[in-house]
Amino acid sequence: MSAARRGPQGGQPTVRIQDIRTLFRAQEIVSQLAVGGLEPAIDAARQLLLEAKTRWQYLQEMLPAHVAQTIPSERESFEVQCADFSRFVLRKGPLPLLRQIADLEREHYTQAIKVIHGGDGDRREYWL
């Protein structure tokens, strides 16, 4: 999820009904996976999905379509954080982001766990 939304005076985060529903659903999934906490549940769920899908399918579904098909430009940057703690800055043009991530994983024998998108003073993180 992106950075917390702040209230009108920048104090307490703004919490919506959708947020609490998401938290309840996360709690339910953690319980079903019978693991101790959110991080182990994410790891277990990721592993189950990777066993059911190819890595390409998994990445394609995890990244929003507009991000997966983006061709990086001069105005924005994409950095990939990997499971082995390495980080890579993706190249500008001509390949879409999804193809660059797949190539990076294959060439460096690693697995991307997060894409960090920056540009025009904005920063977004997409967990994989």
Image (tube, rainbow, N blue to C red):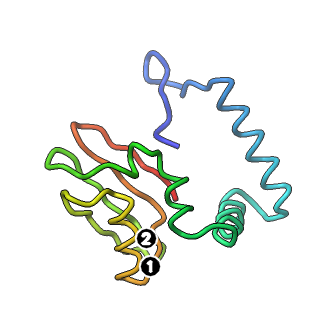
- Kindly identify the amino acid type of the residue bearing the numbered disc 1: Thr
Q: Are marks 2 and 1 in contact (CB under 8 Å)?
A: yes
Indicate whether 127 appears above or below 1: below
**Image position of 102 (left or right of 30):** left
Query: In terms of sequence position, does the residue under pointer 2 or pointer 1 come before the other?
Result: 2
Decide: is 128 above or below 103: above
Residue 61 in the image: state x and y as whole percent.
55, 53
Question: In the current view of this chain or complex, which residue is farthest to the top?
Answer: 8
Pick the front one: 112 or 103:
103
Disc 2 is placed on an element classified as strand
| Type of amino acid under label 2 | Cys
**Residue 112 shown left or right of residue 36 in the figure:** left
Q: Residue at x 24, y 42 (%)?
A: 119
Inter-mark Cα distance, 2 to 1: 6 Å
Q: Position of residue 111 (x, y in %)?
A: 47, 73
Secondary structure type for disc 1: loop
Which residue is drawn at the image coordinates 64% and 64% (left, top)? 46
Q: Nearer the viewer, residue 93 or 82?
A: 93
| Percent x, y of residue 116 | 36, 53
- Label 1: few (<14), some or many (≥20) within 10 Å? some
What residue is shown at x 35% (from left), y 82% (from top)? 107
Q: Say whether residue 116 is left or right of residue 2.
A: left
Tag 2 residue: 82
Can you tell which mark lies on residue 74? none
Q: In which quadrant of the rendered view does residue 98 lie?
A: bottom left
The quadrant where residue 38 appears: bottom right
Residue 124 lies left or right of residue 120; in this view the side is right
Which residue in the protein does label 1 denote? 110
